[in-house]
Amino acid sequence: MNATIRRNTDFYSATIPIIISVFSVYLSIGITLGILPEYIRFSLKYGSMLVGMVIGLQALATLLTRAYAGKVTDIKGAKLSSRVGALLVMLAGVLYLTAPLFSPNAIVVLAIILISRTVHGVSESFVVTGALTWAIGLVGAEKSGRVMTWNGIAMYAGIAIGAPLGIWLSKSFGIEVAFGFIIILSIVSWLAPNKLPELNIETVHKRMPFYKVVSKIAGPGMALGLSSIGFVCISSFVALFFVQNHWGDASLAFMLFGGFYVLVRIFFSTFPDKYGAYNVAFVSLLIEVVGQLTLMASTSKMMAMIGCSLTGAGFSLIFPSLGVLVVKKVTPQMRGTALGAYAAFFDLSLGMAAPMAGLLASWYNYDSVYLFGGISCTVAIMVLVLGKNKEA
């Protein structure tokens, strides 16, 4: 009994500071997701496709720097990566805060926001890769599923809380206060894990080329990327979807998505180990498909809330389920690179899906965005089944 308590204490004492750091960064990301779509659409007077491009730019920046962040993490250390990420969040916050000062000139404001999104995306790359590698290194690879589960909770809880928080701060105190809060969060992200020990770095290990790492984890990565499109459709366009249907602001929709995401992770986190990662991912994708199609067919605010809830519940266990398989495919010395490559599929999904969804919304309406999400999750199921049959 005492040994079990000791192990649990070690796990949480090693991971809680890292989880706080990750949560702070994703809270800052959530704040921007809550306020930027409406700010760009109605204050700057740009179209839906540009909204999607601005939101997707952060993911594109993260995608393009995943390989470098993974290499830095493996060679220089996970703690350094986390610190670099926190500093870049601070820089992004300063840039966001600067943008409204040029509000008479919409083009200048947009340019500064684009730079801010790029910096924010690079920061995410370093923070997530460093955090996952650091935590798994401290507690052991056998607990990698738990590490990814709790870091995932921090990530999506941050987005779910950050979006309505950003809306509230912006409407109550002004958009400058909302952007300024991002700087405070960057300081929290820096300080929280500061006392944790650094990992030993093995410098003599022969590194596998990045393209070979990608080929090893391509199956789980593709399934993750396709499943993430449902999340993209909610995070980028649910606020405008609510405006289109005159349902008021979408704060509760964001909270329900994140709330169900977190609850499923807390109460069913053992399912991938108990029932198998592929089985859990398959059922999760089916639930996400139903959630997206419910949103598409929504005729009331309540129905849209149910769609957001189902999407959050379905999406919840996909990352840790498939991520455990990724960790098993590489050596510990390549873990940072492998996790960076795996997460890059999520970034690619955000970078491509947000502009595509914005284009659909411009051609048709916001209902079509969620049909796109449902079809993407269906294709993810096909990729998952084909991957399982190939390994059988």
Image (cartoon, rainbow, N blue to C red):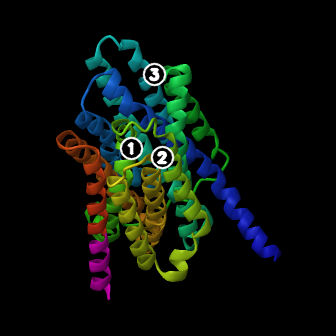
Q: Residue furthest front?
A: 299
Q: Which residue is mark 3?
A: 97
Q: CA distance from mark 2 to mark 3?
A: 26 Å
Residue 70 sits inside the magenta stretch: no
Among all residues in the image, which is located at the extreme left? 363
What residue is rendered at 65% in x and 49% in y? 17
Which mark is drawn over residue 238?
1
Query: Taken as a whole, is the magenta stretch helix, strand or loop?
Result: helix
* Secondary structure found at label 2: helix
Between marks 2 and 3 in the image, the one whose residue lies nearer the viewer: 2
Disc 2 target residue:
253
Is 391 within the magenta? yes
| Residue at (59% x, 53% y) in the render | 198
Q: Is residue 263 above or below residue 325?
A: above
Location of residue 222 by image quarter? bottom left
State yes or no: discs 1 and 3 in contact (Cβ < 8 Å): no
Give the x, y percent position of residue 71: 38, 54
Q: Residue furthest top?
A: 104
